[in-house]
Image (cartoon, rainbow, N blue to C red):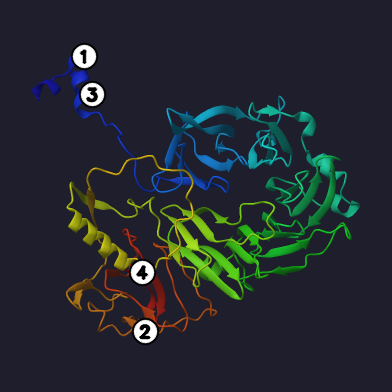
Amino acid sequence: MRRFLRPGHDPARERLKRDLFQFNKTVEHGFPHQPSALGYSPSLHILAIGTRSGAVKLYGAPGVEFMGLHRENNAVMQIRFLPGQCQLVTLLDDNSLHLWSLKVKGGVSELQEEESFTLRGPPGAAPSATQITVVLPHSSQELLYLGTESGNVFVVQLPGFRVLEDQAISSDAVLQWLPEEARHRRVFEMVEALQEHPRDPNQILIGYSRGLVVIWDLHSSRVRYHFLSSQQLENVSWQRDGRLIVTCHSDGSHCQWPVSSDAQQPEPLCSSVPYGPFPCKAITKIFWLTTRQGLPFTIFQGGMPRASYGDRHCISVVHNGQQTAFDFTSRVIDFTVLAEADPAAAFDDPYALVVLAEEELVVIDLQTAGWPPVQPPYLASLHCSAITCSHHVSNIPLKLWERVIAAGSQQNAHFSSMEWPIDGGTSLALPPPQRDLLLTGRALPTGTRMAQYGSGMPRASACGCCTNSAQCRCSSLMQTPMRTSTPRESTSGPHSARWAPLTPTVTIPGWASRRFSCANTVATWLWRAPQGRCWCWS
């Protein structure tokens, strides 16, 4: 080893250092690091996740996984699948667009980057003139509509990324079709939403941040309908039949607007603040989905009261008189709803909610009472807490393997029985010749107290007032939670929190602490006790 300590430059030594100490990435497993974007293809049943390092990962049925890496080390801001094709478009934070394709090579599919493009403005134009905020792939499979910070909408032809300047929708062109009272208001700014009409591909919806929403006719190049709100616009959802538009706003409200030729400027059918009347956070995204039973699903992100829950990361689901807030322990990157893929279907009939957070991917069953989470077959959140040691065990005997599987099944009783809904593709991998285990040890969170309970299982008081949960008066194994908020049930995914008013809280033996740590947990509960908010998981 003394040869590595000699001063000066030695080519032989440098070569040996590279051979002995170079780090080579051999395989990636688990939840991607620093996710930044989410996309889903209803026709392919494939989920796409983009990261801040420029990686694009596609997931389908268990065992179906693709990965692509941009040449630029920039964050992926948006992912959009082209309708009915094995292609997707990614938008990076440097304002560049990239076209990816799934192609068959050697009998297997590969994810390859086909083209890249950066939208350029005229010489001397401000950077905001071409800064892309929204990407809309048209159902014609040949056009991309790009909303920008300047309020203009550019049209790009695929696959060559050729800009069609004669089809661009400028804010001045929209302004001339608005009534006189709307022209005097600052109704424009950046484009917040772009959506195609569910039934008519010749109409697109354009939502501006100042509250203006217009339906633009592509054939006649004119505004057919416009809707003007007094609040800042965040996002838009278009009902499947095209007769209703639901907008969400910065004050925590959402409004329903009828699309009818009877009035060019209709008033909203209704406007509500779900968690009012006190000031609420913005609702940043909303879905309005119809069902065969006649009662729609309203799913939105945010809107929580600023004073009490301003620091929470919540997605709310409202249906048939039930309102549930899913509270996540890390920031929600994006979410989507899996529904009927056939555009000719009369109803959406949503069946699953997919939520991408910074530390986990949660899928919630919307067809089962209570809306339980679905156990994910991949994307395990290995890095959700600090790993202090690890050990690889190879060639596990079959009997031991079956016992491990059975023990895991007993802990997963709270999961939904639904099959994994993201099932695109077919895995061509052969069955593994042997069974291996990776065991990880993790540090307990600060302030954890342990005690013996029951048959020797580690157990502690969730609120930390004593070392034995059986003696704790404020958080026992069976108790009625103390809550002062409205009677609303709130549940979440595997690493998140759940509380239910006026019902007993039942936990199973496991670790407990005052400080939350999602150490590869399978279930989590959160309730209010007389001494404050408590966490408990198992």
* Rendered image: mark on residue 141: none
Instruction: Report x, y in % for residue 130.
Output: 67, 34
Q: Residues within 10 Å of mark 3 (few under 14, many from 20)?
A: few
* Rendered image: mark on residue 11: 1
Q: Which residue is mark 4?
A: 413
Contact? badges 3 and 2 (CB < 8 Å): no
Which of the image's four quarters has the C terminus?
bottom left
User: How far is mark 1 from mark 2, CA to CA?
Assistant: 70 Å
User: How far is mark 1 from mark 4, CA to CA?
Assistant: 60 Å
Q: Earlier in the sequence, mark 3 or mark 2?
A: 3
Residue 96 appears in the rendering? yes
Instruction: Report x, y in % for residue 82.
Output: 61, 39
Q: Nearer the viewer, residue 533 or 37?
A: 37
Residue at 74%, 69% in the rendered image: 270
Q: Earlier in the sequence, mark 1 or mark 2?
A: 1
- Is residue 202 depicted above or below 73 in this figure? below
Residue 184 appears in the rendering? no
Q: Which residue is mark 3?
A: 18
